[in-house]
Every structure is written in structure tokens, then in C-alpha cells.
Amino acid sequence: MHSYGPSERGSVVLDLGGDTGALIIYTGQGRRGQEIEISRDGAPRTHSAVRERRVQDGTFHSAVYPDLPAGRYTVWWDERTPAGSVDVPGGAIAEFVWPTSPPRGTG
């Protein structure tokens, strides 16, 4: 687990356009500091840490993945179990809400 401090308003820059998009995974406070892995078919996994995000309307917790090639991504619950999938469009931000319990067949 990491101990990153909160990210302040305007501290995340996303370069969107063409075939490049971004993904935000929203979680609860309980996942703060934990890393969430994502991957496209046939590509290595990448990860991002869940951080507290302070915005004008309050605080939330999320992992942000900037500069992703457009396509379908698997969000991983653990090393072997997918939590779900999400399509990241070029030129836009995709959003995924972390499940509150493990997918069926785990744990």
C-alpha cells in the first residue's frame, strides 16, 4: 500500500484526442493507497494507485489512467479475477465504479 497524499483540484492533466483516452476508476475510501491493475487484450497490465481527490464539490477516491490507447480494458480485482471491463474511447474519459464485493466465483 502506498501513502500518497491527496491530489488537489487541477493536479491531474489528461491529454485526450485522436485514439488516446483516459480512465477513472471510482472506489471507496477503503481502497486508498491500493493499486488497481488494468489491461487490454494481449498487452501488459498497468496500474495506478487510488488517491483521495479534492474537488470543488468535495472529496472522492479514484485511480486515474491518463493517455490510454482507445479500446476495451479489463479491470482486475486481483491477479486472476477480473472486476469488470470498460471501453475507453479516443478523445474522452471513461469511468468505472469499483464493485463493492468480489465478482462471483471468488473469495
Image (cartoon, rainbow, N blue to C red):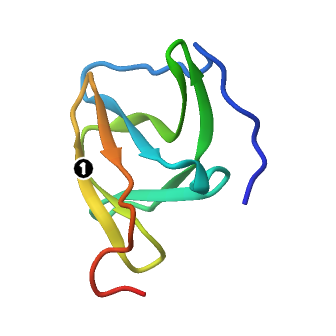
The percent coordinates of residue 40 (x first, y second) are 31, 57
Label 1 element class: strand
Q: From the viewer's side, name the closer residue of 19 and 4.
A: 4
Q: Residue at x 33, y 70 (%)?
A: 82
The percent coordinates of residue 20 (x first, y second) are 32, 29
Q: Residue furthest front?
A: 58
The percent coordinates of residue 13 (x first, y second) are 53, 19
Relative to 58, residue 24 above or below:
below
Q: What residue did someone put label 1 on?
A: 86
Q: From the viewer's side, name the closer residue of 17 and 64.
A: 64
Q: Quadrant of residue 77?
A: bottom left
Q: Quadrant of residue 107?
A: bottom left
Tell whether 38 sits left or right of 94.
right
Amino acid at pointer 1: Val
Relative to 30, residue 63 above or below:
above
Q: Residue at x 75, y 53 (%)?
A: 2
Q: From the viewer's side, name the closer residue of 76 and 5.
A: 5
Q: From the viewer's side, name the closer residue of 95 and 14.
A: 95
Q: Quadrant of residue 104?
A: bottom left
**Location of the N terminus (image quadrant):** bottom right
The percent coordinates of residue 74 (x first, y second) are 31, 60
Q: Rate crowding at label 1 as few (under 14), some (14 to 19) or many (20 or more) other CA atoms within 10 Å.
A: some
Q: Residue at x 46, y 21 (%)?
A: 14
Relative to 100, residue 25 above or below:
above
Tell whether 60 sits left or right of 23.
right
